[in-house]
Image (cartoon, rainbow, N blue to C red):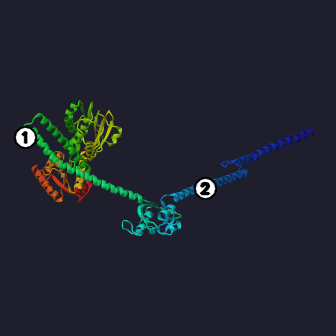
Amino acid sequence: MLKLIFGFILMALIILAIVISIGSFLGLILVKPILKLRDATEKVALGNLDYKVEIKTNDEIEELAGSFNLMLDSLKGTFTTIDKLNNEIALRKKTEENLNKSEERYRLLFSESRDAVMLLLPDNGFLSGNPAAIEIFGCRDEEDFKSRSPADLSPEFQPDGSRSSDKAREMIMLAVEKGSNLFEWTHRRVDGREFIATVLLSRLRISGETLLQANVRDITERKRILEELRQKNIALEKLDQLKNDFISVVSHELRTPLSITKEGISLVLDGVAGSINLKQSKVLTTSKDNIDRLARIINSLLDISKIESGRVELRKKVVDIEVLIKTIVASFQIMAREKGLELRVNLPKGQGLNLYVDEDRMIQVFTNLIGNSLKFTEKGHVDVSLEQRENEVEFTIGDTGIGIAAEDLPKVFTKFLQFGRSPGGGEKGTGLGLSIAKGLIELHRGKIRVESELDKGTKFIFTLPKYHENENAREHIEDAVEAAFKSNTHLTLAVVTFSYSDKIKDTYDGLAEDLFKTIKAQLYRGKDLVLKYPREFFIIMRDSDKNSALVVQGRIEQALRSYFETVNLSKDIKINFGLAVYPEEASNYQELVNKARLV
């Protein structure tokens, strides 16, 4: 019996242990997901909307976790939308603040502007006007101003003869089409007085409607001052021209008697009129020297007069500038030695340097600058050098002379001014040499400047364009066009081209020189010019109209055909001849060339 009871008790304990174990296991399965949900709720409460509950129980708890996650997504979207709305509200407030500030600034500018500012509808007149607009037109107030049309505030006609109402519509339409329109306008005040103004019309779009803002500035006083200045400039130009004419006439009138006087003194000095003693010879020599000096002054006056009036005609040609410099320097060596100075030349080693210049005028430039340096240098040396740059050649004439004060440097090239000269003997110049040199250099499309330090020396530095054979024709033709324009004469450009067979293709370069000589021989006037290029020749005939040029063309064609027959090339070369006449057929270099080339 006891065994039976013990067995039941043991069985009950085993069953109880199994039940407790199963209960604990089921408790863990049920409680753990619930704990996860609790933790997730706490995290969401702290603001973590990105948290996800991961429960895999394949039962209602897993479905509950899924619903919880969907709720979080929806909640997150709601909060995102709220954030966006908050941001948009903040942005709109900021925009409104900026607009209010901008409107306030505009109103301030509108009301405080010294210019008349007004708004108008293109077809219906004024909408508003600032205080300056009311004042400039003499209106009582803004309502009085708005009651008037643009035509009411303008004379019937503008200075160009157009009716104000018609021209106003034209100006308004241009502003509407282009966005803005700036022009001058003659306005009329309410009391009938007129004034000249600049008007700026600017197109505006407000609430889908097109408006115009007009800014009006009274320039009557400025116009009056400009007109006074213009009249004064005209008067000064007339006086300057009168001065130049006077200098030119007087200089020409003085030249002849001076030449006669000089020749008479020379005859007396040579003993032609009888013997003279030593004292008489010295007096006459001094007189002759002074006549020479006076002649130089007259020539300088004539030169500066021609430069300023644009009457200098450059006779340019290809010149070896190094040979020219050496020749000029050699002519000053005696003067330099007499003063105990060293006159040095520093030129690059090579085969010379060609420039396209007026040789006589370049001699004048170098003579003025070198002579000036020798005159104001008592010890040391004078250097003449050149340096080639990419598109120009730079020349320097430097000395160890007395120099020029810094405050005088800007006035160095001013007419009739001299610097650094102390009282005493020696030839006194006219103060024109540097002005003439500057004018001649600029006529050659160059520039000149000066560097100097008092008691240490001076450098005059100037540049001239390099000579490029393929650009030579352009400069020749442009110079010729300018001369024709100034003298109101004709200019004819002829372009001769040759087409040839393969038979003479390799020997054409040598043949071209003969063609050049043949063409040149038919140009009888010294001012006619022929330029040779690989497959064409340019012939520039100054002061020549179409009929005269056709006569020259006939001579050249005949001479070339005769030459071709002589060398048995009549069938191998063909001539093409084109002409262009300034100003009837062309007005500039490119038009002349295109017309002559039959382009």
Q: Is residue 282 above or below residue 260?
A: above
The image position of residue 498, as x and y in percent, is 18, 52
Quadrant of the drawing holding the N terminus: top right
The image position of residue 244, as x and y in percent, is 24, 51
The image position of residue 216, as x and y in percent, is 45, 61
Q: Nearer the viewer, residue 30 or 471?
A: 471
Residue furthest to the right: 1
Determine if residue 477 is in view: no
Amino acid at circle 2: Lys
Residue at x-position 88% and y-position 41%: 9
Residue at x-position 11% and y-position 43%: 264
520 with respect to 370 (left or right)? left
**Residue 288 lies in quadrant:** top left
Q: Residues within 10 Å of mark 1 (few under 14, many from 20)?
A: few
Amino acid at circle 1: Ala
The residue that label 2 is drawn on is 93
Q: Is residue 285 above or below residue 124?
A: above
207 with respect to 302 (left or right)? right
Q: Are marks 1 and 2 in contact (CB under 8 Å)?
A: no
**Residue 272 lies in quadrant:** top left
The residue that label 1 is drawn on is 273
Determine if residue 442 is in view: yes
Q: Helix, strand or loop at disc 1?
A: loop
**Looking at the image, is mark 1 or mark 2 earlier in the sequence?**
2
